Amino acid sequence: MHLVVADEAQKTERDRHTYAAWGSPLTVEQFLQREQRLRAHPWSRDTLRTWLLCDGSGRVLTSCETFRTPSYLRGPDGQYTRGDSFVIASVFTEPPLRGHGHATRLMDLVATELERTQPGAQAAVLYSDVGARIYRRSGYQEAPAWDWHLPVGQGDAGQQVDSLLEDADVPAALARMRRPDVPFYLWPEAAQVDWHLERERIYAELLRRPRPKACGAVVNASTALWAMMARYGELVVLMLDARSEEDAAALLEAAGAQAHKAGLARVVLWEEAGTMPWVARLPEARREAREGSLPMVRPLREGLPAAADIPFARALWA
């Protein structure tokens, strides 16, 4: 068995196989269009590689993608070293080929290749939809994962905030957000946030659904960014930097109003330690163990903390 970096034709061929796992509610042709458009996005063009594990005859046994994301490791002097972490996504083995350890072998080979070829590599990260057991075999540690489900509202989306944000406002909004004060963290660039908005644009077009009028909001010094997940009928909060409980409530109320106007059923927020007590006090807020997207980390260098001590904003998911 050997590792191959896929070319464009191989990527399209894998799309046809992975449709069964991730294509609904799109048609096959719509799913192929979605994948081509996402790969054409500037963030993907700059950071994405598709990996194939092949046997001696060249048959593909399993596949995955990696996206490069900036990460920051604090040293003994208190200063951060910027490096690269690699988000692993779309791990897929066709049903007849499952049960032979191909995905585990692929994860091991990809991590080894990243360590060998990427001098700034700090961590490999994935968001497992199949639990922790499979990826623990390849040295990944899981972090606890909870969602907060918030109701949509019928109020004025801009009533409680200073301004609503449009797609072009993302770079400035991201720049004003506070970085985590922790030993190690990943931090998305504006292009990665826009990649989430590109998914929103694609699904809105293909499913003929209205997009939310705003992708975030600002109140006082606090900021939120969000995106529609049309296939699930949700507005997901990508980033939340709330400086007070009142600001958190105002930003999430604005998100709920945007979700209502777009015909979405709920607002979903990934739990983070800094805002959890405030969110818990919101009316009708419901905490649920996350069924998918379980954060897992494999260190690619020494000195990283345990996965449970690393913050994961929804914008980091791929």
Image (spheres, rainbow, N blue to C red):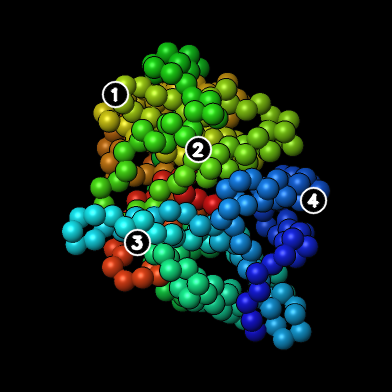
60 lies left or right of 110: right
**Residue carrying label 3:** 307
Between the C-alphas of marks 2 and 3, the distance is: 23 Å
Is 143 located above or below residue 188 in the figure?
below
92 lies left or right of 117: right
Callout 4: SS: helix
Between the C-alphas of marks 1 and 4, the distance is: 45 Å
- Which amino acid, mark 2? Val
Direction right: furthest residue: 29
Quadrant of the rendered image containing residue 53: bottom right
**Residue carrying label 1:** 246
Residue 81, horizontal then vertical, whole percent: 32, 58
- Which amino acid, mark 1? Glu
Identify the image quadrant of the N terminus.
bottom right
- Which amino acid, mark 3? Ala
**Residue carrying label 4:** 28
Mark closer to the chain start, 3 or 4 = 4
Is 247 located above or below residue 187 in the figure?
above
Between the C-alphas of marks 2 and 1, the distance is: 20 Å
Callout 1: SS: helix
**Residue carrying label 2:** 236
Mark closer to the chain start, 4 or 2 = 4
Between the C-alphas of marks 3 and 1, the distance is: 30 Å
Direction bottom: furthest residue: 56
Q: Residue at x 44, y 60 (%)?
A: 85
Label 2–label 3 contact, CB within 8 A: no
Mark closer to the chain start, 2 or 1 = 2
Q: Residue at x 69, y 67 (%)?
A: 6
Front-most of residues 284 and 32: 32
